[in-house]
Image: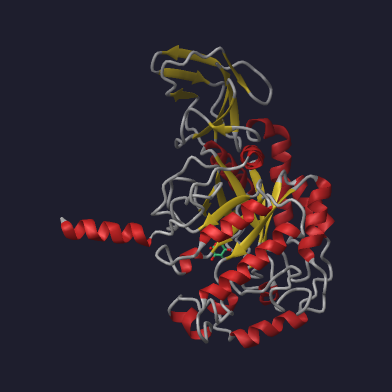
Amino acid sequence: MRRSFFMLMLAVAMLPAEAQKGYVPSKENVAYRQQFQDNKLGVFIHWGIYSMLAEGEWAMLQKKIPYEEYSKLAGGFYPSKFNAEEWVAALKAGGAKYICITSRHHDGFSMFSTKSSDYNIMDATPFKRDVLKELADACHKRGMKLHFYYSLLDWGRPDYNPKGGGLAAKWTGQGQPDYNTYHQFMLSQLKELLSNYGEIGAIWFDGAWDKGKAFDWKFNELYTLIHSLQPGCLIINNHHWAALEGEDAQAFERDLPGQNTAGFSHDVQVSQLPLETCETMNTSWGYKITDNNYKSEKTLIQYLVKAAGNNANLLLNVGPRPDGTLPEIAVQCYGAMGKWLQQYGETIYGTRGGLVGQHKWGVTTQKANRLFVHILDLQDKALFLPLTGKKIRSAKVFIDKKPVKFVQQQEGILLLLEKQPNETDYVVELTF
Ligand code: GLC
């Protein structure tokens, strides 16, 4: 008994409780949380010097490339076709309301102008253009929100000294670790990111799983700095744990909230915060030339719908090529989503997860007194909704407003459809 109490206390002491203690989100923050939830679809962009290897963003580690040699890639990075305006226009046409781009990934290369290290796009490449600044300007101009991905781990800096065991320890992490100098480096980079690029919707941290929960990441200082520089900026941390104090939204990697098919969410309770699921279009985050394993347009649209039904946003990834272009197939998939959203956007944007949770047949979303029943896969012409004690005023097919017959009972309502649906998403709208 005493021993288990001791173990419990030890576990509590080991939690990174220092994440912003006593945090109360500002008015701006609460407002952006709402808008963020309304926005529903974002585009994740993984782009860096790893794109040149065309093997995904983990290429350095997976291919056992020594850091010294890997870093030389920067000297040849020249994305001659990069055009931020074109990116934003294409992604906007895909129905996305925000973009989250890698400002610095695990390889430690900064894709922005930074005084905190020379290993960045301005000083280490012949391109010498701040692509994040160009993207920020295009986003601000076109009403697209901008979020920055920021890696907490660094495969190159000796002061971080990644504790990855195996590969990470072998190829990187030489020298003496000193988390204090590394932490200072992150603080100064975050200050740059939040001072030089206009309004930033969120900082999306990743990589805390590398040293784990027991490590003192000093989140308090990181979170406090972000919130003091831009009170409306959301902090999202893809640490794969339950949300910590000071965080404004919760991330789920390759899984809908509450599910754990990818194995990253076993330890995660779904919080009351806004939720966001990130997923790839093919199977890679960073550009991988051989990965043609793109999900179908139907699968992608249905995933967005399922995310919305689970009260979450979808952050859908594209990995641009080293020349700065977006793979055509990815643009085509976003285009299909955008086209679908032009018709069905009202049942997705601005909604929250509906009264009826996810079933095999689909999900529901809700806006005030309207419940949208998204039928994705139904074997029958009738559908029972367990809306106990709810009185329904009307039921109609969303797209053509044709009335749908229904039977109302204390236990719920039975929809009697005209046919067995076979659309990507057959939406029936109920009003209370
Ligand atoms: C994982 C990967 C990382 C990727 C991220 C996106 O954390 O390590 O490469 O950026 O997922 O969610």
Q: Nearer the viewer, residue 146 or 158?
A: 158
In this view, the residue farthest toward the left is 1
Q: Nearer the viewer, residue 336 or 198?
A: 198
User: Where is residue 431 drawn, in percent x and y?
Assistant: 58, 17
**Residue under the point 57% across and 60% down:** 222
Q: Quadrant of the C terminus?
A: top right
Give the left or right position of residue 234, taking residue 381 as reference: right
**Residue under the point 79% across and 74% down:** 122
* Residue 281 appears in the rendering: no
Give the left or right position of residue 288, taking residue 383 as reference: right
User: Where is residue 212 drawn, in percent x and y?
Assistant: 43, 65
Q: Is residue 387 above or below residue 28?
A: above
Q: Across the whole image, how many numbered discs are drawn on residues?
A: 0
User: Where is residue 71 drawn, in percent x and y?
Assistant: 67, 82
Give the left or right position of residue 417, taking residue 389 as reference: right
**Residue under the point 46% across and 13% down:** 408
* Colouring method of the image: secondary structure
Q: Is residue 359 above or below residue 206?
A: above
User: Where is residue 352 drawn, in percent x and y?
Assistant: 57, 33
Quadrant of the image occupied by residue 147:
bottom right
Q: Quadrant of the N terminus?
A: bottom left
Quadrant of the image occupied by residue 287:
bottom right
Q: Nearer the viewer, residue 79 or 74?
A: 74
* Residue 267 appears in the rendering: yes
Give the left or right position of residue 87, taking residue 152 as reference: right
Image region (quadrant) for ligand 1: bottom right
